[in-house]
Amino acid sequence: MLNSLILVPLIGAGIIGFWPSSLSPKLARQIALIVAIISLLLSLVLLTQFNLEDPNQQFVVLVPWIDSLGLSYSLGIDGLSLPLVILNGILTTIAIYATDESINRPRFYYSLVLLLALSVFGAFLAQDLLLFFIFYELELIPLYLLIGIWGGLKRGYASTKFLIYTAISGILVLAGFLGVVWLSGSSNFAYDQAVVHTLPLETQLLLLGAIVIGFGVKIPLVPFHTWLPDAHVEASTPISVLLAGVLLKLGTYGLLRFGLNMLPEAWVYVSPWLAVWAVVSVLYGSLNAIAQKDMKKMVAYSSVGHMGYILLASAAATPLSILGTVFQMISHGLISALLFLLVGVVYKKAGTRDIDLLRGLLNPEQGLPMVGSLMILGVMASAGIPGMVGFISEFLVFRGSFNVFRVPTLLCMIGTGLTSAYFLLLINRVFFGRLSEIVINLPPVKWSDRIPAIILAVMIVILGVQPNWVVRWTETEANSMSMSKTTVSQVVNKSAIATPSPFHGS
């Protein structure tokens, strides 16, 4: 079953890219959409067969690959990766459906999107450190081309910047993985067999530092965030949906899977500093969002701030905060995808994203009332209004983190107020008020532009009312991860009485 999630997009990309005769743009789009829907259905089948009470990897696939390197083709899925796999299937389908039918070089474009989906599926399913790294780096190639070929005027600059930052992220992550395996004396790259507890604490801290910074670039966290706004502004709308909705989650997933879960003893020592880092990212991203005039860049900086919530909850590592990290990843994926879709519709119809130029888009006769209504719902969800998915995710994060990091949690809660502030500015300036000249006589919005946004809006509301549809799949895994961290935490705290840790003053 897990093999199918990788093979189906690969076969689809091969059919579209290497079709022996000419392939019409419409047919290429239909094939890509069918492949994406099949992948989504396969992920939903996994959902129906998943054992909620088993914290171990399920549906395991293990095939020896390169014995001399200790590399195996090892796949599995658990409560941490299952929701993200389904999210990838949903947003890939929506991104393909939302793509303009008249896009240039459609065969190449849809092939790259499917390869991107394949690499994300593989990264979430990989149970081998080196295999994860291969998939983690594989997504760099299609995304670089998707931004560099189909992006805006500064697409070359944005795609190159993305390439450089992601390459640095990969180097740091690989260095951490190699250090874990070689220094622990493991004979292979299966991370469940890496005996890291035998390493000195100083070595574990060094390895964890490389892993955390590497994934911090990908998330991205301040000050490694500067590639993200540029990439979002220049990327096309469907690619922005995938970038914010799924690809950033590779960093947060890696932080949990290979930071907290693999190096829990070192995690205890660095977690206070991670909480401080989370505060900086939340406040810096939110304050920068307030200063933006481009709607798309404002949503991009909003992502920087909301990723900080995940770092805070990961640092706390309580059962409730780990549930919050997973729910925040799903919540942010759905909300950011909705916001980028709607900003794309506004830009497509009005020809600009400048907040100072747009007015009155909620006008029922000459504006974009449906788009405006969905945008209001999206920003309310992002600001954590009760009854929507954003409220549940932030409540879990803050409630789960407060007892461990009280001051950082309170400071991060300020980010929720700032989110309300900058999105209120956006709604007030763009959608309310008297119609500006640029808004008059806009072309009508087709249902093909509305349907993806409506689907996401419905999911945002449904999961806000019934969060257990997500939480129940992760609860067992969250308890397992937090118990591991808490046990080590108690041991370290006891030993710290006699021997101060490297992060405490004498």
Image (spheres, helix red, strand yellow):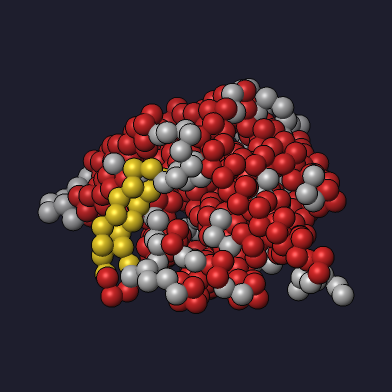
Residue 342 is at least partly visible in this image: no
User: In front here: 198 or 100?
Assistant: 198
Q: Quadrant of the N terminus?
A: top left
In the image, taking residue 503 as reference, residue 206 lies left or right, namely left
In the figure, 456 relative to 292: above or below? above
Q: How many labels does the image show?
A: 0
User: In front here: 256 or 384?
Assistant: 256
The image position of residue 293, as x and y in percent, is: 71, 52
Q: Residue shown at 55%/70% (left/top)?
A: 198
Q: Residue shown at 61%/59% (left/top)?
A: 264
The image position of residue 353, as x and y in percent, is: 62, 47
The residue most toward the left is 20
User: In front here: 226 or 120?
Assistant: 120
In the image, taking residue 80 as reference, residue 111 lies left or right, namely left
Q: Residue shown at 46%/38% (left/top)?
A: 54
In the image, taking residue 313 as reference, residue 370 lies left or right, namely left
**Residue 144: which quarter of the image?**
bottom left
**Residue 221: which quarter of the image?**
bottom right
User: In front here: 284 or 291?
Assistant: 284
Residue 18 is at least partly visible in this image: yes
The image position of residue 270, as x and y in percent, is: 71, 64
In the figure, 314 relative to 446: above or below? below
The image position of residue 258, as x and y in percent, is: 53, 60
Q: Residue shown at 81%/41% (left/top)?
A: 417
Q: Quadrant of the C terminus?
A: bottom right
The residue most toward the right is 506
